[in-house]
Amino acid sequence: MVLVNGMGGIGKTALAQTYATFYRDNYAHIAWMQQTSDDFRQDLISAEGLLHSLNIDVTGAVDELFPRIIHQMRTLENQPNLLVIDNAFASLTKIKDQLPKQPHWHILITSREEIAGFELKELGFLSETAAIDLFKRHYTLTKLQDADIAAIVKAIDYHTLTIELLAKVAQRKRANPDELLIAIKDDITANVNINHAQNGDKIERIRWYLCSIFKADKLSEPEIHLLKQLTCLPTEFHSYEILEELLNIKEEFDFTLSEILESLKESGWLIADSKNDSYKMHQVIQLALFTQLNVKLDNVDLLIDKITNNLELDQTKDNPIDKFLWIPFGQTIDGLFSESTDDRVSSLQNNLALRLKERGDLQGAKNLLEKAVLDAEKNFGEDHPATAIRYSNLGVLLQALGDLQRAKALIEKAMISDEKKFGEYHPTTAIRYSNLGLVLKDLGDLQGAKTLIEKAMISNEKVFGEDYPTTAICYSNLGLVLQDLGDLHGAKNLLEKARISDEKNFGENHPNTARCYSNLGQVVQDLGDLHGAKNLLEKARISDERNFGEDHPNTATRYSNLGLVLKDLGDLQGAKTLLEKAMTSDEKNFGKGHPSTGRSYYNLATLLYKSQDYQRAFSLIEKALEIFKNSYPKNHPHIEKALWWHERIKSKLNN
């Protein structure tokens, strides 16, 4: 008695058919039946041709016919024989001892459920190579390359039936990779035949057909409740501890989370990794169930609230790196409810966007924040504090993206709203002053920036004291403005206060502290202490590489700043390596027209001038100058400096 176990559509029936065909000459008789109900006896009696083959009269009740069938099967003279029970239910275990046995009979069972009392053979998923081969068995055109097919089969987690279905759709519709990747989500028309379909009918729509395969009509209320929540999680293995933190089990249920998870695993709805005590819902099942169970926001509002809270950052104690774990959870919720304007969704999108920004995905953050702003305006109006927060968040992001005028307009709206609601010396208003001050600094309005950030600093000192994290942010921001104004000693004093505060509150390896080291290092460099600057900037670089990786915008800034110090120290090759890494990173993260990329061009151009590579230096300074002219007001210091270097390098080329 062998049980082939695995999720629906993975190939259990096909494997049993292949076995029966391949070994047919080894058996005297083969009987095949499919279980369609919890009453195995009735299904056996209804198996096509079985009663006739056993010479049993078809009249009679189930209680009479079932024993006759079993008796006739057991008394067949020829042996061995094979009984295949396809799509068996867990109820089969009730009559296991009544089934015909060896040496006369082998029994091969296929089921999505784990059924006690049988030797279990778990059927896994195809390898990537086998999945591509299966796709190409049904797709004979050349439009899709192996790399395209690999991406498609990976996206559906190597699910056998769906591979066949998408391959036939690709063949019939001449579909491109992008269409196939969203075929299930968009429930595109198929109009193809597959062997798995009942009665040979054509599959009209992809998602509708998958829903018909993964029917949840026999599940209990606790199981359905949990499945609705699980459809809103990323389709990967999650530890029991994570699930216990996120998933809500109603008090009126008589089952614990672990009991329901095990039940769903045993019935084939979840995949379990017992070694790591984790569970996963296959992506195909997730897509089918989300539609079939008609999952609504109200079904998963507690889950959304928990993920939204987990994505929130407390700037007084949290490390943003620790929040990156929850980004895939937020992205899954956003993907499922992206069209909703409900504030539960837009609040999650707001927090998710901020974490994406910190991880370096500025464009992804922008898309989410723009929607969150529109939803807040619709739900609360333009003067509501929640809307002001969204304005400010989007403004700060646009500043990072180089859209300084729009950033200024949004943060000013947030500032005016908060001044009206809270007054000028409220902590919330202080945040707006500080954020707007940094935008004004980038726009070249240093006095305006100084006035606003000083207001924020005074407010925070009054409310929180000098050692509080948000006060340290004001010290750091104001220090940058004083540096640009030429007050280097004043800048150094403020940045030292910020450094001491950040080291005390966060430790040396926190991103906030790294930013402070970097800012202080630049001021120390301007004061002529190049070795002191190098030590600070090295600490910032090491910290950000560890926290964010080499390709993150923050790390690129550290490379750039450290490269400029190495240039002043005479290590031109070391400086060139770092400045080119910064430039490559900025081009990748922001594009070739962004102010950050312009600064990378500018910095590398000044180094190449010193290395006497005038031709490349001129090419880069021209790019930088064009970007600065497109990004800043006419009298901005960046433009003036770039013009000076442009003429200087040009004169070298002409000579």
Image (cartoon, rainbow, N blue to C red):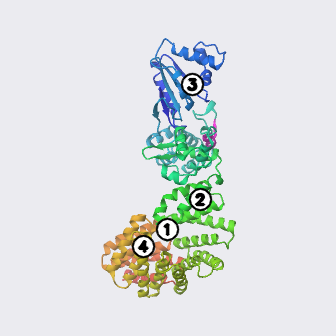
Q: Secondary structure at mark 1?
A: helix
Span highlighted in magenta in the image:
202-211
Q: Nearer the viewer, mark 2 or mark 1?
A: 2
Residue on which disc 1 sits: 590
Residue on which disc 3 sits: 33
Q: Nearer the viewer, mark 3 or mark 4?
A: 4
Crowdedness near tag 2: few (<14), some (14–19) or many (≥20) residues, C-alpha within 10 Å: some
Q: CA distance from mark 2 to mark 1?
A: 32 Å
Residue on which disc 4 sits: 513
What type is the residue that disc 1 sits on?
Phe
Crowdedness near tag 4: few (<14), some (14–19) or many (≥20) residues, C-alpha within 10 Å: many
Q: Are marks 2 and 1 in contact (CB under 8 Å)?
A: no
Q: In the rendered view, would you say 393 is above or below 145?
A: below
Residue at 47%, 87% in the rendered image = 485
What type is the residue that disc 3 sits on?
Met
Q: CA distance from mark 2 to mark 3?
A: 48 Å
Residue on which disc 2 sits: 305
